[in-house]
Image (spheres, grey):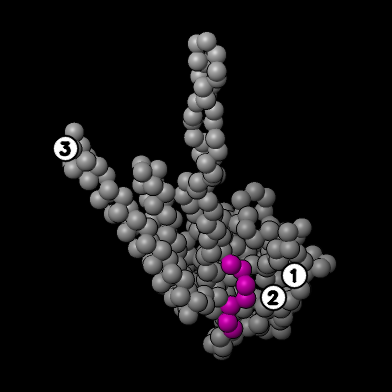
Amino acid sequence: MLRGFYTAASGMLAQQRQTEMLTNNLANANTTGFKADQSSIRSFPEMLLQRMESKTVATDNSLQLPINKNVGSISTGVYVQEVTPLFSQGDIQETELKTDIALINGSMPADANGKMGTVMFVVENSSGEMRYTRNGNFTLDGTGFLTTSEGNYVLDQNNERIQLNSDDFTIDQDGSISENNQAVARLGVAFAENPDSLVKEGGGLFRAAEDELTDAYTEAEVSFTLNQGVIEGSNVDESQTMTDLMAAYRSFEANQKMLQAYDRSMDKAVNEVGKLG
């Protein structure tokens, strides 16, 4: 019975984490470039139950031989193994602002597991560290540097900050930035062969877990375009997320009722069955 407590409690904890993840997805349904999280729920290793018996051997001393009979396997609960972002393309929304840029996925090679790669803007955070984002809602700061809406510097192909004289500039589909018909820089775009290796941070930023991502322009099998005057919205499917949220809530409630049933059984065992003696 005590094992049932742990099994039901683990189910409640897993569904609570699932609910928090789905709620965060819904809260960011209108966040530019947001990538919805998805979770993987796994079962703990199953246990093999055995019944211990003994068999009397017809000897002078009535020898007792221990015998173990298999009863069967039993699950010991579930847990959220990992939470990873979904890097599918979000909806493209027209803004007509020259500082808004959207990355449009083209051909993306897949790894050995069939996981598609993705491309991302290269930015520099407040600590001077390189980060990656799909949020193309850019702006110009007081000194003319191209930054994200959170104040992170947007980098060019050479990982240098991009400084412009005004917001009267153009960006071609190949990332080339021109001002007064003069080439200024090329917008930095990185390619992530395995997006699941990226670590999600706040403000729509991602960090490479190990080595820095490669330059997407130099990847022969990678194709993409950059569109000016549009932004990529969130890829959260609101209707599906609401359905998953209700399912997680019902599963949490079912585990809660199971836990309450075990609690009532333990109460009877301690306070009522014990009195019969």
Residue 108 marker: 1
Residue at which label 2 appears: 105
Between 101 and 154, the residue placed more toward the observer is 101
Q: Nearer the viewer, residue 15 or 277?
A: 277
Q: Position of residue 37 (x, y in %)?
A: 52, 65
Can residue 62 be seen here? The reply is yes
Q: Amino acid at mark 2?
A: Asn
Principal SS element in the magenta part?
Answer: loop
Question: Could you say where residue 166 lies in the image, as x and y percent from the top left?
Answer: 57, 80
Instruction: Name the residue tied to disc 3.
Output: 275
In terms of sequence position, does the residue under pointer 3 or pointer 2 come before the other? Answer: 2
Numbered range of the magenta stretch: 86-92
Q: Secondary structure at mark 3?
A: helix
Q: Is residue 88 magenta?
A: yes
Query: What amino acid type should be assigned to the residue bearing mark 3?
Result: Lys
| Pick the front one: 177 or 6 | 6
Q: Mark 3 or mark 2, which is nearer to you?
A: 3
Q: Is residue 107 left or right of residue 257?
A: right
User: Do the numbered discs 1 and 2 sit on residues whose CB atoms are within 8 Å?
Assistant: yes
Task: State whether residue 28 appears in this view.
Answer: no
Indicate the position of residue 117 as horizontal and vertical percent values: 70, 65
Determine contact: label 3, label 2, CB under 8 Å: no
Q: Alpha-carbon distance for marks 3 and 1?
A: 70 Å
Earlier residue among tags 3 and 1: 1
Q: Let me know if residue 172 is in the magenta part.
A: no
Image: 187 above or below 231? above
